[in-house]
Amino acid sequence: MFEYAQRIKTLPPYLFAQIDQKKREKLQQGVDLIDLGVGDPDIPTPKAIVETMQRAVEKPEHHRYPSYEGMLSFRQAVADWYKRRFGVELDPNKEVITLIGSKEGIAHFPLAFVNSGDVVLCPDPAYPVYKIGTLFAGGEPYILPLKEENNFLPDFKSVPKDVLKRAKIIWVNYPNNPTSATADESFYKELIEWARENNIIVASDLAYSEIYFGDKKPMSILQIEGAKEVAIEFHSLSKSYNMTGWRLGMAVGNKDLIAGLGKVKTNVDSGQFQAIQEAGTVALNLPEEELQKIREIYRERRTAMIKALEEVGLEVYKSDATFYLWIKVPKGYTSAEFVSLLLDKCGIVCTPGNGFGEYGEGYFRISLTVPTNRLLEAVERIRSLRL
Ligand SMILES: *Cc1c(COP(=O)(O)O)cnc(C)c1O
């Protein structure tokens, strides 16, 4: 009866909502599903965080509206964590803002800086929110393909001059979802130099900085000299601390970019529940061993899974971060066809690469967010397909 607005009507269905529907059908049929689809940690939130929350909930001062920008104590904990982890200095008053999960910030950020007709440079394949946030703000996404031959880094220097003139923001996300690729200092250096020359905002999504397996820890773009002039970085407690359900994240970096995002947020939300921010402060101060324990779980799963997948003849992209594996579909299948086959014949849910954009075609993604025995059971089911 009531017609959807154009901006909703033209949206593709949100990737995971679609997969959820298929999953429900299979579950109703009684299939023993192995769900490698959504990137949602199965490991519980560390105890110290949960216990802080239990106590914090009882405090009446937390029962009132929080401040829009987030509690100073949480923003200070973010600044301290950035200093310890990356050696980056942040002013908690001007260079940090609390988010209700980083998805919220990523979706709202373009509203602060994008006018109708402005271009936003969006990687593909990618987390869908960069493109959708752009569209909601009336901007035009311009696709930067992430290709295996470039280690899934965007070739931002290839953007044509006329597009560049209209470009306002570039999104980057390393360690990357869905490809698991990482970026090094030289990539970020060139990116910052190029962004400064062309007056483009660099929006970095660092959700997976703590899920790494090599000797070199993933870096923050703010470690690059001059980055603070053009960059904002989105981060989240979701993936580092198994807190996806808590909805707590932060944006840090250039103070004008933070202020712009803050203006939008002041008008659409009223901040995150303070008890959650108090628990988040404890999370950011957890001893490194807690994070190391979580990494070891993923490392074990990852090693076992890569070995098993290669044994059945699948080609896995090798990186040393994130809890995803980015895998080539066997010859003769599209991403959608192969993912459907896995669901129908094996009861395995994974995500088709093209769900992350057209350049994801030819791949599928699995999440290492189920126990190793279930991952290996999944491989046995794939083996029985005799690919
Ligand atoms: C999970 C994820 C996020 C969002 O996490 P929140 O739970 O909203 O903080 C952001 N970016 C990427 C690439 C992700 O995979």
Image (tube, helix red, strand yellow):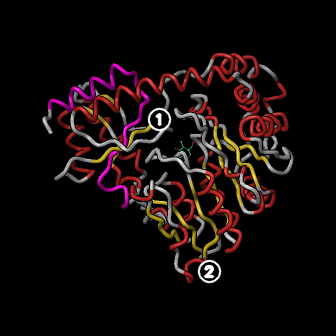
- Residue 184 in the figure: left or right of residue 330: right
Q: Quadrant of ligand 1?
A: top right
- Residue at image location 29% in from the left, 43% down from the top: 315
The kind of secondary structure element at disc 1 is loop
Write down the residue under mark 2. Answer: 165
Magenta span has 131? no
Relative depth, front residue between 321 and 374: 321
> Which quadrant of the figure contains the N terminus?
bottom left
Percent from the top left, x then y, of residue 354?
34, 55
Percent from the top left, x then y, of residue 267?
74, 55
Question: What amino acid type should be assigned to the residue bearing mark 2?
Answer: Lys
Span colored in magenta: 359-384
> Which quadrant of the figure contains the C terminus?
top left
User: In the image, which disc is placed on residue 323?
Assistant: 1
- Residue 294 in the figure: left or right of residue 31: right
Question: What amino acid type should be assigned to the residue bearing mark 1?
Answer: Phe
In this rendering, the count of numbered labels is 2
- Picture layout, residue 251 above or below residue 138: above
